[in-house]
Image (cartoon, rainbow, N blue to C red):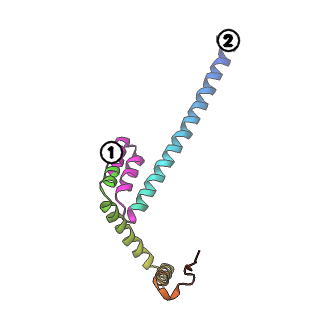
Amino acid sequence: MISLVQLVILGLIVAVCALVAVWLFRKDTEVENRRRAAAKLAAALTSYGMVKIPAFLIDYSVGDYSGMAEKVKNLAEMAASGEDVVIKELDQVFERVLVQKLKTEAGRAWIAAKLADAVQSTDPATVQTAPVATVA
């Protein structure tokens, strides 16, 4: 027969194992949620024309850490080699965002307001406060 002490010890072991399992399940869920968020962000960035950043976010979302590290290294090398590649990707993003803005009335109004601000800031007739020369 099993003694009372053995039953208590067995119960404690089962309780500790259950608590560890629950804790591990929660940690795994947190990691999965971060990976899902990375995949969603990658999809959103891709829809706006980005290529480089979404690539390593996708690697992170599937757990390919070596692939992610390689893509981050390539991204750093690309940035160090000059800004032409970065500007090209940002131009693609700008073009896609502009297309999205032009699809809605609110977006077109926002663009019109930005264009009006740009015209005013370059028009010398709109200068209100010019520096004044002083004699010391």
When the figure is inspected, residue 122 is found, relative to residue 22, above or below; the finding is: below
Q: In this orientation, which residue lies closer to the viewer: 41 or 9?
A: 41
Q: Is residue 54 magenta?
A: yes
Q: In percent of the image, x 70 and y 14: which residue is there? A: 4
Q: Distance between the residues labelled 1 and 2?
A: 58 Å
Which mark is drawn over residue 70?
1
Q: What residue is drawn where x is 38% and y is 42%?
A: 65
Task: Say whether residue 11 is left or right of residue 34.
Answer: right
Question: Looking at the picture, does residue 105 appear above or below residue 13?
Answer: below
Helix, strand or loop under label 2: loop
> Which of marks 2 and 1 precedes in the sequence?
2
SS label for mark 1: helix
Relative depth, front residue between 136 and 43:
136
Q: Which of 7 and 109 is in front in this view?
A: 109
Residue assigned mark 2: 3
* Residue ID at (34%, 60%): 86
User: Which residues are the magenta region?
Assistant: 46-74
| Main SS category, magenta section | helix
